[in-house]
Image (tube, rainbow, N blue to C red):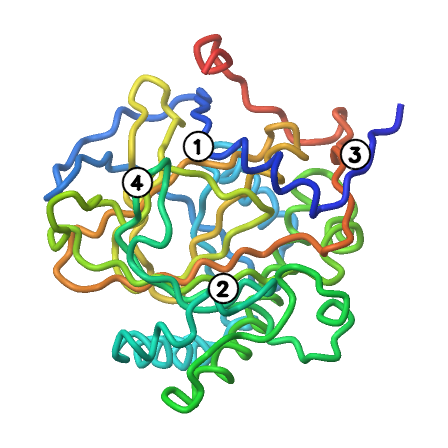
Amino acid sequence: GRAACTPVRACVAAASSHRGRPRGRAAAAAQPPSRSVGTLCTALVMTVPTVCVGRGDDSAAAAALYDAWSTLGYCYVSGADEYVPRAVVTAMHGALEAFGALPDDVKRSVHVSKGGVAWRGFVAYGDEGTRGTPDFKEGLYLGADLPDDHPGVVAGLPLHGRNLLPDAHVPQLRAAIADYVEAVTALGQRLMTLTSLALGLPADYMRREYTREPLAIVRAFAYPPSRAASDGQSRFGIGDHTDFGLLTINWQSAPGLQVYDERDAAAAGWIDVPPRDGAFVCSVGDMLDRMSDGRLISARHRVINAGDTTRLAVPFFFDFSWDAHMRALPIDESSAPPRLVMSDAARAA
């Protein structure tokens, strides 16, 4: 029978219950990795796939995306300049650096507690945590800067509204974020086309059914060097977790991101995902994992800044339209790419 439909707003609780659930998947024939010991943790040395998403051979790009997201759940995305010009990224980075340099009292004047249902504003150290442990980071909650007469704002919908910013102190920030949101949204729609093709669906399926008016949930986090944590503070900028939504499109200024790699079940472990010039890091969220029946993997990840400078990261959660309905994707088993085989031990995880 036809799958029941559930509005996206009702799926947040269900998706949140999925966060951080360890799931092993045994991929075929990976070489045993070498190991390198960092200052604060041990990471495996494995390759994170790169997928070129520039206009061209959509079939090849979709196949590469499926290979990456069905095994690791993560990939670098290159060829994105036509969607997100580098000048837009540079302006965003500079404006956020200026915000980060503001005195603490100015930042707290736009604290998220003043942002209402739009859920925008500053979050200080200790405001957020993972599994009961405060994260070692501060940040800014952002999104599409919607005017007061926007239908979603008039209706009082959560996550709809204006960005809460100290305009008098960083006047360039509002426009820089607006340009960045518009550009990365275009990249997200491009990824939706490739995701549809990767799953054997019509090219416009995901955009038509789920992202006609996507939610742009943007976070700008500053992670100090982990060694600067005082006694009692976690050294993780953010602990082991998964993202609950559709896709995450992440820009980062420095290393620190790690993903749990289970492609080789005999040598599973954390691998580094450092920044690459001109590339974004893109990953699958819990809801896409579930809607694809586990074909695409929402992978566990964490941040630990073992460097000497503050790491800035801007995860862009490209999410479903507010009125989208969640249902299992109509994947044709006879024409879709082969499902990844899971070991008995992985199924029990």
Q: Amino acid at mark 3?
A: Pro
Which residue has dot 2 on it?
Answer: 79
Q: Position of residue 119 (x, y in %)?
A: 54, 62
- Residue of label 3: 330
Give the mark, 3 or 1, whose residue is nearer the N terminus: 1
Q: Quadrant of residue 65?
A: top right
Q: Label 3: how many residues lie within 10 Å, few (<14), some (14-19) or many (20+)? A: few
Q: Which mark is residue 32?
A: none
Q: Quadrant of residue 188?
A: bottom right
* Viewer-nearest of discs 3 and 4: 4
What residue is pinned by disc 4? 133
Earlier sequence position, callout 2 versus callout 3? 2
Q: Position of residue 36 (x, y in %)?
A: 14, 37
Circle 2 packing at 10 Å, graded few (<14), some (14-19), many (20+), is: some
At x 68% / y 38%, what residue is drawn?
Answer: 199
Foreground disc of the pair 2, 1: 1
Observer-nearest of 289 and 116: 116
Query: Which quarter of the image is occupied by the N terminus?
Result: top right
> Residue at label 1?
20
